[in-house]
Amino acid sequence: MTKKIAILPGDGIGPEVMAEAVKLLERLRKDFGLKIETETAPVGGTAYEAHKHPLPDATLKLAQQADAVLLGAVGGAQWDTLPRELRPEKALLRLRSELKLFANLRPAILYPQLAAASTLKPEIVAGLDLLIVRELTGDIYFGEPRGVRTLESGERQGYNTMVYAEHEVERVARVAFDAARKRRKKLCSVEKANVLETSGLWREVVLRVAKDYSDVELSHMYVDNAAMQLVRAPKQFDVIVTGNIFGDILSDEAAMLTGSIGMLPSASLDAANKGMYEPIHGSAPDIAGKGVANPLATILSVAMMLRYTLNEPPLAGKIEKAVSSVLDQGLRTGDIYTDGTKKVGTAEMGNAVVAAL
Ligand code: IPM
Ligand code: MG
């Protein structure tokens, strides 16, 4: 059966990196028998400009109907002063919650070819391969009440609510335990149970779920310590499971261990493994339109889509191999460039991956 993929290029470098992913999908369709059809729709600031809304109804509908969503990036300074509801980021948050994408998988893998591009010493990061499973539809991101109120004194006060129900913790914990089972069988749950009630309950639920996974070694870590351990000795981690806000922060930190945020894909999955796939690098307005952005994170997001939603792990493996082989050839976009390698642009990098397939 033909699977439908919603293509949402978005803002900044989104359309440039997405063009390379689309090239790749075309090749997989034509030459590797992948049964897919694609449909493109606007999202983020680009959608706001055209339709006065960052997530037009037609885009949401397409995303809901599709088997998988491939998203470039959203955001840009020119939209930062819009009311919160109309900002590009809101489109992303709404897609996550409307599609019930509660499990966000963010791998941080250091390609041996890029060890020199990391800001950390090679011996600290060489061979790094960790997976952050971030809860994506709960926590302080969506918690009510929220807002800015005026106190009796006339001073304004901002407030948000950190909140997790047991079922929300349980389902993301299961995704993380299952992932650990397929890897090195180690799971570290990260929270702030020494201070926060929400975290205390989180830990209780994780411990309960752990009874079904006696083959996985479970540990717990406070988020401040986890932030430190990630730069001190990141290879101690296999899978990390954490809440929405802690996961937002730690996944940026983990990404940087690998030298370039331009290399890292992500998957956001619902209970049936329908997913939205996106590079984690964001819209990078400073280099947008110059043809220099790194398309590999988006290309690797296609690989994740093939693995998790389209059930084509061999094709996913082929893409990952092709990426590794263009790195072996010494091709580098600016963000991962080091002395002695060959600097290429977005399209050249995308073409090289397609050729290496
Ligand atoms: C991310 C981003 C988003 C988030 C923003 C753009 C809303 O930082 O995907 O990590 O905070 O989740
Ligand atoms: Mg983030």
Image (cartoon, grey):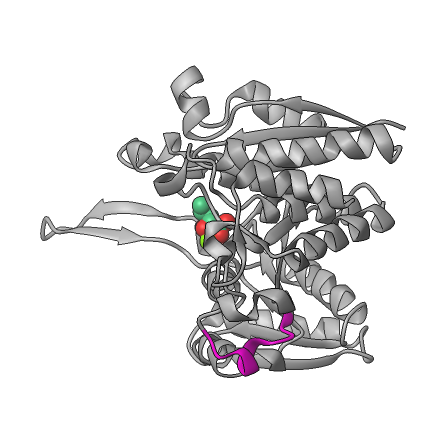
> Which residue in the rendered view is the most extreme toward the top?
50
Residue 122 on the magenta span: yes
The magenta-colored residue range is 120-129
Residue 168 falls in image quadrant:
bottom right
Q: Nearer the viewer, residue 342 or 169?
A: 342
Residue at the image position 72 percent from the left and 40 percent from the top: 354
Residue 328 falls in image quadrant:
bottom right
Q: Is residue 151 left or right of residue 93?
A: left
Residue at the image position 62 percent from the left and 66 percent from the top: 113
Residue 123 in percent (x, y) is at 56, 83
Residue 46 on the magenta span: no
Q: Nearer the viewer, residue 219 or 169?
A: 219
Residue at the image position 72 percent from the left and 60 percent from the top: 175
> Which residue in the rendered view is the most extreme toward the front?
340
Residue 265 in percent (x, y) is at 61, 51
Q: Is residue 94 visible?
A: no
- Quadrant location of the C terminus in the rendered image: top right
Task: From this view, report whether residue 77 is shown above or below residue 1.
Answer: below
- Quadrant location of the N terminus in the rendered image: top right
Q: Is residue 269 left or right of residue 136?
A: right
Residue 194 in percent (x, y) is at 45, 81
Q: Nearer the viewer, residue 134 or 196?
A: 134
Task: From this view, report whether residue 183 is shown above or below residue 236.
Answer: above
Q: Is residue 165 visible?
A: yes
> Which residue in the rendered view is the most extreme toward the left?
153
Label tally? 0
Task: From this view, report whether residue 139 is shown above or below residue 310.
Answer: below
